[in-house]
Image (cartoon, coloured by chain):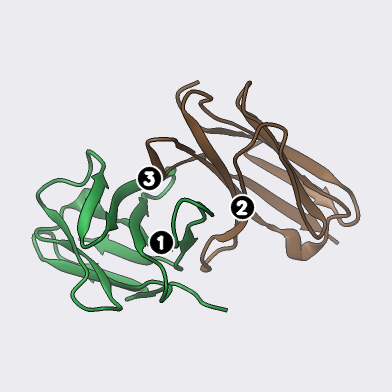
Amino acid sequence: EPEVTQTPSHQVTQMGQEVILRCVPISNHLYFYWYRQILGQKVEFLVSFYNNEISEKSEIFDDQFSVERPDGSNFTLKIRSTKLEDSAMYFCASSDGPNTGELFFGEGSRLTVL
Amino acid sequence: ILNVEQSPQSLHVQEGDSTNFTCSFPSSNFYALHWYRWETAKSPEALFVMTLNGDEKKKGRISATLNTKEGYSYLYIKGSQPEDSATYLCASSKTDSWGKLQFGAGTQVVVTP
């Protein structure tokens, strides 16, 4: 069964360092997302991406964050200068569109900022 | 209601018993209600996407109902099995941003043999 895959599963970084989280969405999907869950809190939306551009972003998604689809398969989330409060589980998701409206999630990448 | 709320936060069920729990969500500009089953260290598994008031969906022993006018959904597990142990998340979306899901905190279900 097709699935969304994410790497790395866990990354530990020092505050101020750049981090790139990678995702391979389901191959025929056109809509891509990043969500995150800070420990003990709800899963929250970060950004949606369609047709090679951001279609919507949350207040959390400031200038320190960026997304890219560098080739036909990968979808990346970059955090330029990590802060302690960026520590969270980051989930990538993909969808084939509003007709089904279904989002398929990866297993997540746990980011720990020290 | 502005947020998605789930209750109870957790519940313990004896194997073979049936159980249900609720999700309340903002009813204005409603687009869809999603249920996910999430086991630790795995990806959230999509159970249902429901859009119409009165929708009822079923997948094996799990079923869900939707009331968009009053903004709630129920998830039912019939004859609970230990493999049903997981956190069940609901999430709603609005018509102007169908892929932007607003999640509840989840209901953690533990089924004991």
Residue A56 percent across, percent down from the top left: 26, 45
Residue B44 is marked as none
**How far apart, in angstroms, are the residues tagged by discs 2 and 1?**
18 Å
Q: Do the dots labelled 3 and 1 sit on one chain?
A: yes
Q: Quadrant of residue A11?
A: bottom left
Whichever of labels 3 and 1 marks the residue nearer the N terminus, that label is 3
Q: Quadrant of residue B33?
A: top right
Tell me the kind of residue under disc 3: Glu
User: Badge 3 is on which residue?
Assistant: A44
Tell me the kind of residue under disc 2: Thr
Q: Do the dots labelled 3 and 2 sit on one chain?
A: no
Mark 2 chain: B
Residue B87 is marked as 2
Q: Residue shown at 43%/73% (left/top)?
A: A26
Residue A93 percent across, percent down from the top left: 41, 61
- Image quadrant where one finds the N terminus of chain A: bottom right
Q: Is residue A109 left or right of residue A62?
A: right
Q: Which chain is brown?
A: B
Q: Is residue B105 left or right of residue B60?
A: left
Q: Which chain is green?
A: A
